[in-house]
Each structure stands twice: as structure tokens, then as C-alpha cells.
Image (tube, helix red, strand yellow):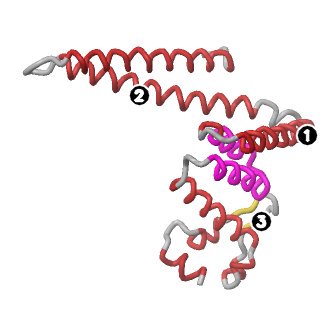
Amino acid sequence: RQRQMCIRDSKCPLHQSQELFDPCLNKFVDDGDAVNLHKNQVFLKHFTKMYFETAIRIFGNFPGIHIAYAFFLFNAFNNVHTALTQLHQSRKCKPNIMQSFEIYKFEQIVEAHMQAEAIKNKGVYFNLSRTIEFECILKDCYVSIWKTSDAQCNFWTHLLHPHMVDFNALDKDNENIYKYAKETDELWQELCQINHNY
């Protein structure tokens, strides 16, 4: 049944079975396992990952999905970077008090893991959490710059309207320009605090 579902879905891991790799087990899917994929751990991990990604696309505003996906990525693939990114994303979805505690506790677990790996691998993971924070703020900054530009385009479109100028629309556009420019400046200041080279 699983194979029939996968044949219809081009994004299913079954179509990329020769490329599926599990870093925890340090192995690819064996070609001989293609018949019994429902018993193959590597395939099942990638299949579960596909379901998480679909759930996030559909229910992206639920922090529980991001938290569960972060746990899965960390435990199944040892993917610290993406797990922390998912935890950061879950904070934006207004988690309740229990979910906030789960996020905090899991971040502590990941930080402890990164410190242990940094000692073992001579500092490879040491600045990863700051890097992830920087990437997330930079992404928000890009969105804020886009909103500012869009508000300025709307302002000039309303101002140069050939028939009649709508002062209420101009006033609203002006407020949006100010709000988004201020937001962009605050995000830029945060970026500069993390990386002084900016």
C-alpha cells in the first residue's frame, strides 16, 4: 500500500531511494531493501521527514509541529542546525506556556550537545546557535526591507494617480513606510550586535 501511495507522489523518498542517507547510521538505502522499504530505517526516516514537511506547509502556524519536527531532526538525523531553526520558527507561532518550556528545555539539550561536540571536534559547533540566530534575523530583515519598499511604491502610486490624490491612502502608506523602516533599522541593529563586521 505504501508503495502505491509513493508511486503517485513524485516527492516521495521512494523515487530517490539511491540518494537516501542516514548520518546516524552512516549508510545509504540498500538496493536490495527496495522490496521491504517499510522495514528499512533509512527510508522510514526520510518518509517521516516528508510527512513533517507536508504538515508544516499546511499547518505552519502551529508551534507543536515545529517542536516535534525539531525533535525528529535532532534525534533521527542529528541535524542540529535545522532543529534549532525549527525551534526558532516555533517561537514565532505564539506557543503556550507548556510549548515554551519544551522549546527552552530542548534548546538546553541541543546547547549541551553542541558543547560536547565542540570539545570533541575542536570548536566546530561553538558558534552555531549565534549563526542560526543571525540567519533568522537576516531573513526577517529582508522581509522588512521588502515591506518598506512595497509601502514606498504604494505611496508613489497613490501620489502620482492621474485623476485624484487620495490623502487617506497617502497617510496610511506614510505610516507603513515609517513602521517598516523602523522595524528594519531595529533588525539591522540586532544583526550588527551579533556580527560587528556589518
In the image, taking residue 177 as reference, residue 16 lies left or right, namely right
Nearer mark to the viewer, of 2 and 3: 2
Residue at mark 3: 27
Q: Does dot 2 land on a helix, a strand or a loop?
A: helix
| Magenta-highlighted residues | 63-90
Q: Quadrant of residue 33?
A: bottom right
How many other residues sit within 10 Å of disc 1, few (<14), some (14-19) or many (≥20)?
Answer: some
Label 1, label 3: how many angstroms apart (C-alpha)? 24 Å
Identify the amino acid type marked 3.
Lys
Quadrant of the rendering where the N terminus is positioned: bottom right
Residue at mark 2: 146
Nearer mark to the viewer, of 1 and 3: 1
Is 144 part of what is drawn in magenta?
A: no
Q: Does dot 3 land on a helix, a strand or a loop?
A: strand
Nearer mark to the viewer, of 2 and 1: 2
Q: Nearer the viewer, residue 111 or 19?
A: 111
| Horizontal and vertical percent position of residue 63 | 64, 46
Q: Does dot 1 land on a helix, a strand or a loop?
A: helix
Quadrant of the rendering where the C terminus is positioned: top right
Q: Quadrant of residue 17?
A: bottom right
